[in-house]
């Protein structure tokens, strides 16, 4: 079963054309309404003045001849003038409202364009930082792999314990490089709307055990207190196995990367219910540097990295959590973040149980 999740470009050409079209339409409407109002005012003024001038001319001619005053019926009546005035005011009100609405539309469209421009500038800056970060991320594992590979090739007097250590480093850095490349390629596919997931009943418990086991040596070496807690009787989930591994890898890598003095990592799997559906809740807890409240809304935005100096001094691409969010949404799940500065963070991923699983219904 394939699930295709389309993602439109950050700033689509259609959105830009729509904004410019709104501006052009609003300006045209404003000019049209203004011209109509001015034309109506001019028509009323000309008609009223013509009648007044005609009556005044006839009155002057009659006065010169010593004749009677012209017929008063020819003089514009107060009722006629008042009626014309009300008609003109109605037209002015209607056309003024149209003009005001058009001007408001112009302001909204201009605000939208300004916002889009700012976002595009920010995106351009994030992409520039991304290129620099990726370059560093690629160089570091490659340099280590090359150094230890050359050491193993050129030296024959290395003790077996050291050889095993060097091989472990090469393997670890190779995995790190593979994860980085996979993240970049997957994000590119997502951005182009070509990413597909093969959903099938998956034992998420087995995936968690395998992923955690692959990190045990690194966690022990870096001095982490860590453990994996799994509740009994968890159902299978409809998922792409590799995608679930990618979720865990990104969350665990972040927990390791942003833990400083207090190195603590706990992964929990438990049964949960969301919106009437049972499923599996995956929680990754750490006691790292934490996340500022104002920055949480941007965590899952591609290329975004927090402005905190402690974050900037760590290597990274800003793609991990964006990929996690996309994978979770493609699996019809949810992602929650709970964090306090210095106290650490907890990321919770809910995945609905497989329809074929007996415990999927409540």
Image: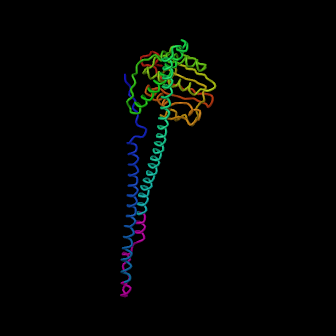
x and y, in percent, of residue 186 in the image: 42, 28
Closer-to-camera residue (154/271)? 154
Q: Quadrant of residue 190?
A: top left
Residue 100 visible to an observer of this rendering: yes
Q: Which residues are magenta?
A: 61-86
x and y, in percent, of residue 272 in the image: 52, 21
Position of residue 99 relative to residue 228, above or below, is: below
* Image quarter in which the N terminus is found: top left
x and y, in percent, of residue 241 in the image: 44, 20
Residue ID at (50%, 37%): 129
Closer-to-camera residue (319/23)? 319
Residue ID at (55%, 23%): 284
Residue 248 visible to an observer of this rendering: no
Closer-to-camera residue (328/155)? 155
Position of residue 202 relative to residue 191, above or below, is: above
Does the magenta run of residues contain 83? yes
Report the side of 3 relative to 220 (left or right): left
């Amino acid at each position: 079963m394939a699930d295709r999740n389309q993602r439109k470009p950050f700033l689509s050409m259609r959105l830009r054309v729509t904004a410019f079209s709104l501006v052009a339409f609003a300006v045209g409407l404003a000019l049209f309404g203004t011209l109509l109002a001015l034309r109506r005012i001019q028509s009323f003024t000309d008609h009223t003045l013509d009648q007044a001038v005609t009556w005044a001319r006839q009155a002057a001619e009659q006065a010169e001849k010593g004749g009677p005053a012209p017929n008063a019926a020819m003089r514009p009546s107060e009722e006629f003038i008042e009626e014309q005035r009300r008609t003109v005011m109605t037209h002015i009100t209607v056309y003024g409202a149209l003009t005001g609405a058009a001007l408001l539309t112009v302001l909204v469209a201009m605000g939208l364009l300004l916002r889009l421009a700012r976002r595009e500038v920010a995106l351009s800056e994030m992409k520039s930082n991304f290129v620099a970060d990726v370059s560093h991320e690629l160089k570091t594992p490659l340099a280590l792999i090359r150094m230890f590979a050359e050491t193993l090739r050129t030296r024959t007097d290395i003790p077996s314990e050291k050889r095993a250590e060097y091989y472990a480093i090469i393997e670890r850095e190779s995995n790190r490089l593979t994860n980085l490349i996979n993240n970049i390629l997957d994000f590119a596919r997502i951005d182009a709307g070509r990413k597909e997931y093969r959903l099938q009943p998956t034992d998420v418990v087995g995936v968690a055990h395998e992923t955690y086991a692959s990190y045990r040596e690194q966690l022990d070496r870096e001095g982490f207190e860590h453990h994996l807690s799994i509740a009994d009787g968890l159902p299978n989930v409809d998922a792409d196995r590799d995608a679930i591994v990618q979720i865990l890898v990104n969350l665990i890598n972040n927990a390791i990367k942003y833990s400083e003095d207090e190195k603590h990592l706990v992964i929990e799997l438990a049964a949960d219910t969301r919106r009437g559906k049972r499923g599996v809740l995956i929680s990754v807890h750490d006691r790292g540097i934490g996340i500022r409240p104002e920055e949480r809304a941007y965590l899952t935005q591609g290329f975004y990295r927090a402005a905190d100096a402690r974050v900037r001094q760590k290597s990274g691409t800003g793609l991990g959590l964006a990929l996690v969010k996309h994978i979770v949404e493609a699996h019809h799940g949810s992602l929650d973040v709970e964090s306090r500065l210095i106290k650490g963070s907890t990321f919770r991923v809910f995945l609905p149980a497989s329809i074929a699983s007996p415990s999927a219904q409540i």
